[in-house]
Amino acid sequence: MRVMAFGTYDTTVHPRVGILIEGLRRHGIEVVTCNVPLGHMDAGPMVPPPSAHPGISRQRMRHARCIAELVAKARRAPRPDVVIVGYQGRLDIQIARRLFPGVPLVLDHLESVDDVADRLGHAAQAELRKVDRIEQAAIAAARLVLVDTEEHRRVLAPAQQDRAVVVPIGAAPVWFDAGRAGPKASPDPFGDASAEPRRDPLPEPAADFEPGFRPGEDLRVISVGLYSPVQGAPVIGAALSRLDGYPITVTMIGRGLQAQRTKDLVGPNAPRVTWRTWVPEAELPRLVAAHDVCLGVFGTGAKALRLVPNKVFQGAAAGCAVLTSDTAPQRRLLGAAGLFVPAGDSDALADALRRLAQHPPEVARLRAAAVALARERFVPEAVVEPLVERLREIVDKRG
């Protein structure tokens, strides 16, 4: 079987497609790539900024150049048995449909238009809803539609749900590599319940993992995100403001709509907080692995309640204890390997951080459980198993 990963996706911004490719290859499937990265666009190329936006012409020209190069690459590539169109490929799939007539198409539908609106805030919703028909046409063109959680699958139209495959986001190998060395790293190498808990036994702790938090040391906490409403960063800010006097240091990485509000909420009554707007992609796993606790999402919007974010998979793979909101998909995924607080509850988050700072053995247990679970279930070959099964069915039926 030959699978083509096609589109303007950018694995340096959204690692999802790279994880799919790695996972398929580990299952012995030939994967060829036909990719011209468009670069960072929060909502994807199918969602233009308002027509008066000064960058609209440049954006359209950049997208047109990428598409022209993508078409040229596709015409030189060997014919695939299946084409997977990468994340934010709502327009790309129509190009693939014309380039590869008769070839089954798979759309990585990690976010709907409504999800993007929830993530970017209400100001973007009017523009985003104008392109809902583009999204529906993209889903209609796909033989399979990839989603990240069962909750995401359920929001598809009933006629679309049978074509949907739940493929968790997972983590790239670099995060697991960081987890094997994480506890030995410097704390800052850059110088600056609604679901039932898991009932099956957790994997045995990894022999090469030694949690580094000890009595008398500061609890090292990290949060990475876009400061969007989905992330619930102001919840983190309000919680940090209640931690004065506790042995906790915090690293906050990212930028976005709610960054300033989060900083204002932290105020002066907080542990030592380092604010970083950006960390090079190659350095981020090592930085996360140098912390004890990775914070997940705490927003209360519809998307926040049905996702498991990249940072949860990555933080666990890097060997951090994962502290996140108590939502059905996150509790189902992590079970006893995660620590949960109600979504939007800054008091509960502050209480959880205080308890962890005072109980190193519990931090060690959570870290060991998270990394063991990640090495069994978050690796690329594990997360793509449902996709591999469906792809083989499709190819076998085609003969």
Image (cartoon, grey):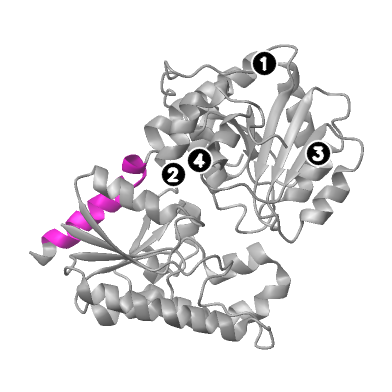
Q: Is residue 128 magenta?
A: no
Instruction: Rate crowding at label 2 as few (under 14), some (14 to 19) or many (20 or more) other CA atoms within 10 Å.
Output: many
Q: Which mark is residue 239?
A: 3
Residue 124 can be seen, yes or no: yes
Label located before the other in sequence (3 or 1): 3
Q: Nearer the viewer, residue 114 or 318?
A: 318
Q: What amino acid is found at the position of numbered circle 1 in the picture? A: Pro
Q: What amino acid is found at the position of numbered circle 4 in the picture? A: Phe
Spatial CA span between label 2 and label 1: 27 Å
Spatial CA span between label 3 and label 1: 20 Å
Q: Which mark is residue 360?
A: 1
The segment highlighted magenta reads 380-396
Residue 95 at x, y percent in the picture: 33, 80
Q: What amino acid is found at the position of numbered circle 2 in the picture? A: Gly
Spatial CA span between label 1 and label 4: 22 Å
Tell me if 45 is positioned left or right of 377 in this view. right
Residue 295 at x, y percent in the picture: 65, 39
Q: Are marks 1 and 4 in contact (CB under 8 Å)?
A: no
Q: Quadrant of residue 33?
A: bottom left
Label located before the other in sequence (4 or 2): 2
Look at 34% across and 74% down and name the residue there.
Answer: 70
Question: Disc 4 marks which residue?
Answer: 313
Residue 56 sits above or below residue 183 on the image = below
